[in-house]
Structure formats: structure tokens, C-alpha cells
Amino acid sequence: MSYGERVKALVIGCGRVGSNVALQLAEEGWEVTGVDEKEEALTRLGENWRGGFVLGHGMDVDVLREAGIEDADAVVVATNGDNTNLVVAQVAMKRFDNQCVVVRILDPARADFYRTLGLRTISPTKTAISELLDAARACEIPAREPVST
Amino acid sequence: MYVLIAGGGKIGANLARSLLRDGHGHEVTLIEQRRDRYERLEHEFEHQVQLGDATEIHVLDRAGIARPPDVVVAVTGDDEDNLIICQLAREKYGVEKVVARVNDPRNQAHFDLLGISATVSATASIMALIEHEVPEHDLIHLLELRKENLEIVELQIERNSPAAGKRVAGLRLPEGTRLISVMRQGRSELAEDSTVIRPGDQVLAVLEPGKEDELRKMLLAT
């Protein structure tokens, strides 16, 4: 793949989740730009970060434009606010006509509802619940002594 | 009328108080997520205030959003929250009327994009008043009627304006614009065909969005 044809991705919210998504996509050869309102986010991306970074809030359309939302192939929305994520994701889809928008929503109820509206919501809470359930069920529970009467 | 109010700050609390005032006979539920604020509100509003995050579906359910309310008012200090509350109310529960507070006027476009109207922004309203009181421009936006897709503007007529000295009937106004009134020396009168525009007049006009430049060129030539 030549340099100019790399897939462009925007990662809005570079906390623990977003920064790792950004790093992984960059590792896979994507052209990634991170957006975060805190400068500390850059430390999470590491000093070898070669992708772009825009300091600012995802609700700010100028920030999104500067980060290249207009020709991004994929947008990952992962700030720590569910409602911020829901608004930013809809702005990316409806205003900037982005076809691939994935959005982290902690609250399973809102994640489910907005999925019915066409958003690709990912709920880490739901994943945690199901994995914890699986892990609990997989425990080897020793057979109980019969209760003597 | 049943009104659900999200956000028990000054605006939400005063709104609830006004709606409950004797004689109105309205039913109100106020939702506030900060415990300290909730406890203070509970003294006054008792069972009519509930503790919780109004962007959470189970909180809205408990507040009776499924009835549904006649109006849902989202007046928290967070625009994201106000947007999502209104969107849930409308799209999930079929609430017909929603009213949202816009804290940061830069977020107005997001409300418009997601079809949330009516919106109220104190900052934008005060800015409009400042512009009206201390005009820096020859054309001031006074009011946007989003639903009607019309706006009302005020124009300041100067000595060298092409409209000065002409009768309204003699003006060739751009399509999609109309003059409403003429204010002269503190007195306002409706703009009739026979009204003559004078230098110093403030003229109110109603127009379709995007017609400002044509109207300005015609009346002011700037």
C-alpha cells in the first residue's frame, strides 16, 4: 500500500481505551489522528507517536475539521462521557456523512437504544457482565458434603 | 398538563415553581442528580422531585416518561445531556414537545442537526440584546423562527442608503423578504406601502434565511 492510500482514522477521546485503539490501528498501518481535550493524552500515545493529535473537545466542530473528519474513513468515539459520545457520533454520521462510526457507550440501556437508531455502539459494561458471568460459571466448585439431618 | 423537567438548578427549580403556582393546576416532576441539591429541593417540592441522572432510561421511566408527558424540558448545565434527554424523550417515548437549554451557543448546530427544537440559550439571547442596544452592524438578527424557517432582522438606514427618501411601495425588495415596521425617534409604525423611509430609521424586516445580503444591498448598499 502506498503512503497516500492509507486508511484514515480519527480517534476521539484518547484515554485508556482510545489511546490503545489509536496505537493498535497505527501499528496496523492506518493513518490515525487522536483528539483529546487534555494534553496528558499525548503521554498515553507515547513519545514514538507518529500520528496526528489535535487538542480540543469532540463537540467542537472546528476541532473535528482540524483533525480531518471530512475525509476520515473511520471514526472511533471513546471519550469518558456517554452522552458526549452519542452526540459526537451522530455529528460524525449526520453532519460529516461518515459511514463508519463506532462509539463506546458504558450504559447498556443507552447502547441498546442508540443501536436501534443506527449507531454502532459498543458497551464495555455489557462485555464485562457477560465475561464475568462466563468466568463465574466456569469456576470449579467442589461438590458439597450432603447435609446431615 | 404533565411536565417533566430534567435539571434542578435555578432554571429548573424556578420553572417547576411557576408551573405549580396556584391556579395553573399542572403536574410536574423534577429530576436532579446532585444529592445536595436534591435534598434542598425535596423540602420544597416533596415527592415531585426525584434523585437521578435524567439521561438514564430507568430514571426517566421512574419519572413517568412512558405516560408520556405533554412536555419534557431539559435544562441541565450540560448540552450533551440536554440533547440526549430530548432525543430519548422524542425518539424512544414519543414525547411530542421537548424544550432544551443550550448552554454554549456553539452547540446550537448540534441541536439543529438532531432536530431538537425549541431551544433556549441565555447567552445567545443576551448577545442579541446587546447587539440591539449597541449596534455594531447595520443589520442585526433579532429572532430566528426555526420551525417557520424565517428570521427577523433590524436594519439601520443611513443618509447615503439607497432606501432613504423612498416609499416602501417604491422599493424593489428581494423575493422572500418583507418590511414589518419603521422605528423613528423612538416611535414605531407598521410599514405600509405609503411609508417613507428616512435616514436614521430602524427598519424591521422578516425574511427567509440566506436573504440578508440581498436585502442589505437593496436597502443599504453596503
Image (cartoon, rainbow, N blue to C red):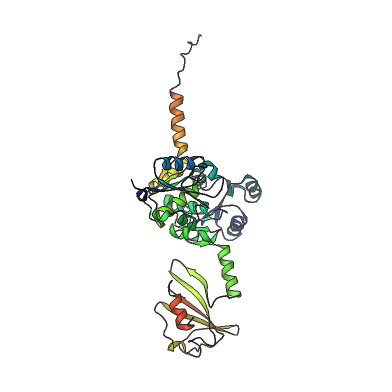
Which residue is rendered at x = 43% and y = 39% of the image? Answer: A24
B37 sits left or right of A19 in the view: right
The mark tally for this picture is 0
* Vertical side of B127 occupied by B107: above or below: above
Which residue is rendered at x = 44% and y = 66% of the image? Answer: B147
Q: Position of residue B201 (x, y in %)?
A: 55, 84
For residue B88, say whether it is visible: no
For residue B109, say whether it is visible: yes
* Vertical side of B144 occupied by A53: above or below: above
Q: As rendered, which of B6 and A73 lies closer to the eye?
A: A73
Q: Position of residue A37 (x, y in %)?
A: 54, 50
Q: As rendered, which of A13 and B149 lies closer to the eye?
A: A13
Identify the residue at the far top of this view.
Answer: A148
Q: Position of residue A25 (x, y in %)?
A: 42, 42
* Vertical side of B56 occupied by A133: above or below: above
Q: As rendered, which of B44 and A27 lies closer to the eye?
A: A27
Q: Position of residue B156 (x, y in %)?
A: 54, 81
